[in-house]
Image (cartoon, rainbow, N blue to C red):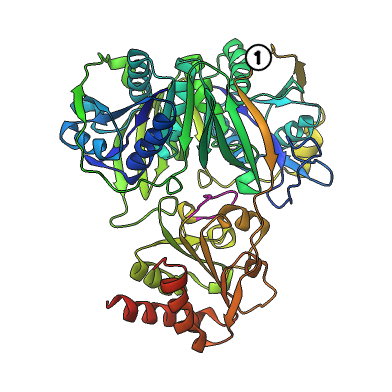
Amino acid sequence: MKILAISEQRDNKLKKSAFEVVRTARTIADQTQGEVIALVIGDEVQAIAGELGGYGATKVLVVQQPKLGKYSSTAYAKIIAEAAKKEQADIILFPATAMGKDSAPRVAVKLDAGLASDCTALKVDGGNIIATRPVYAGKALTEIKINSAVKVFTLRPNVFPAGISTGTSATVEVVDIPLTESDFASLVIETTQASGKIDVAEADIIVSGGRGMKSPENFKMIEDLAGVLGGAVGASRAVVDAGWRPHSEQVGQTGKTVSPSLYIAAAISGAIQHLAGMSSSKYIVAINKDKDAPIFQVADYGIVADVFIIVPAITLETKKLLGK
Amino acid sequence: MKLAVCINHVPDTAAKINIASDGMNIDNAGVTFVLNPYDEYAIEECLRLKEKNTGEVIAISLGGDSHKETLRKALAMGVDKAVLLKDDSHRDSFAVARALADYLKEISADIIFFGKQSVDSDNSAVGTMVAEMLGLPSVSVAVKLEITNGIVTAEREIEGGKEKVQTTLPAVITAQKGLNEPRYPSLKGIMSAKNKPMEEKGPMPSHVKVEVLAMYKPPSKNAGKIIGTDVSAVPELVRLLHEEAKVI
């Protein structure tokens, strides 16, 4: 199978999801005598493209111009679809990021392709791919296959291993795809990035607080622990609805579905909609005063005690361990 | 201004999900279905735009008769007209988008809203697919929206930040929580909803590209160990995370 791997960059740095997508494409290609063609779109991104060879790309296509430095739903979709046609790709893999989730549906329509979003596993089955994708925020899983000639999948970040680079550099081919003014019908004019902040959807470690934190000020201790662990701050729906934390941090069915290596739930009781969003985390730690809180049913490790004493103590103990 | 909002009828997020005996669908028994939570923000934004600019708001839902309940809620919130594209078949995102796009082409709305995703199949795809099918620009996962003289400026959520996007009408917007605070239907709204038009149409059948082979519950996690009930448990917890789980 010929696989086009959409490799996302931000500020001319490849995202971790780009390596995950290329590596996954490589795994499929190896089983099907296939080929992995990566695609990088941006402004002067040629220099960063070769690195994808270390993750399994045979060739990297680069489409670059100043206007592509910022995301455009319409222009990116056109470029991806044109590249897929040019390379006669059978499969297009996107990261299920803000960019991937926005452009993949357009690309699917352009190529008359079926789309499976936010997949958590792909396996080769004869001449086709069987994808696992969570539905109902992870309360159920489905196995699906796409029956159209071209197939589009988006891969949930942090689930597919990127592995370690072999150091091989790929052939980089700068491709000119002519774009007109109308291709930029929608265009990002400004990006605001909270500096140094890790998004819950991409974090490998998440420290989440619930209503039991009692006030927005008390989230300082959650931030401190997340900081020491190099993780992100998460929040329950109750906390977001109360206006204590931004919605971008909400974990659960009307927030983000996450699968980090470590999820620490502080003063979160564990409503069904919250559990759906985080119970696929590799390790779960629950800290709650109520020993009957449902969160303990999914936790690997639990401490039944006051979060206000336990969370700062974990921060201190972790600092000691990490020599910080 | 002609405003359209596409809405879905989905299991309540508080519902426990069980798998039907066919192993392909969920068991609907005992499950309460509601208006898709993200669609509430989409409806609210339509109503606010109508209040600001005058016009008409049409809510459209694709599905069986049960979707009428959700359409009625939209009417009670203040939507002017409801359209049920009556279809009981299983459709993937592409086929849903196709049916909606076919209808939306007929009505030429100035702006078409969706929730950013339907909390059942979680594909986050239909809104943007409809935009592509209709040749319209779109902004997905919008948390802020301003429209001045046909120019749309919207903010969308991205990893760890926001993007400000500019485009023009007509356009498709998919709504994220935070876009606004949806209103509750008033008693007057609920009463007047009964007299508002609810049109029924049969959409064209569409070719489904994604086939569901199986549906099952994720492996249930076994409750782990309670390490302790006071601060003395902390060193052991950190040791376990470091040595057993190897996550820190």
Range of magenta residues? A250-259
Name the side, left or right, on which A287 lies relative to A223: right
Q: State the image coordinates of residue B151 (x, y, percent, origin top left).
A: 38, 26
Q: Which quadrant is the N terminus of chain B positioned in? A: top right
Reply yes or no: does residue A256 show up in magenta.
Answer: yes
B156 falls in the magenta region: no
Q: Is residue B7 left or right of residue B248?
A: right
Task: Choose between A166 and A66: the one closer to the eye.
Answer: A166
Q: Quadrant of residue A157?
A: top left
User: Which residue is the site of mark 1?
Assistant: B206
State the predominant SS element of the stretch in magenta: loop
* Quadrant including the C terminus of chain B: bottom left
Q: Residue furthest right?
A: B29
Tell me the element at label 1.
loop
Q: Residue at x 81, y 27 (%)?
A: B65
| Count of all numbered marks drawn on residues in the image | 1
Residue B77, image quadrant: top right
The percent position of residue B15, horizontal first and vertical second, equals: 73, 50
Between residue B125 and residue A7, name the one nearer to us: A7
In the picture shown, does residue A85 fall above or below A250? above
Count residues near mark 1 (Cα–Cα under 10 Å), then give few for <14, some for 14-19, many for 20+: some
- Image position of A174 (left or right of B235): left
Is residue B247 positioned above or below A288 on the image? above
Residue B198 in the image, given as x and y percentages of width and height: 77, 22
User: At 36% from the left edge and 68% from the top edge, which residue is drawn?
Assistant: A229
Q: Is residue A81 above or below residue A191?
A: above
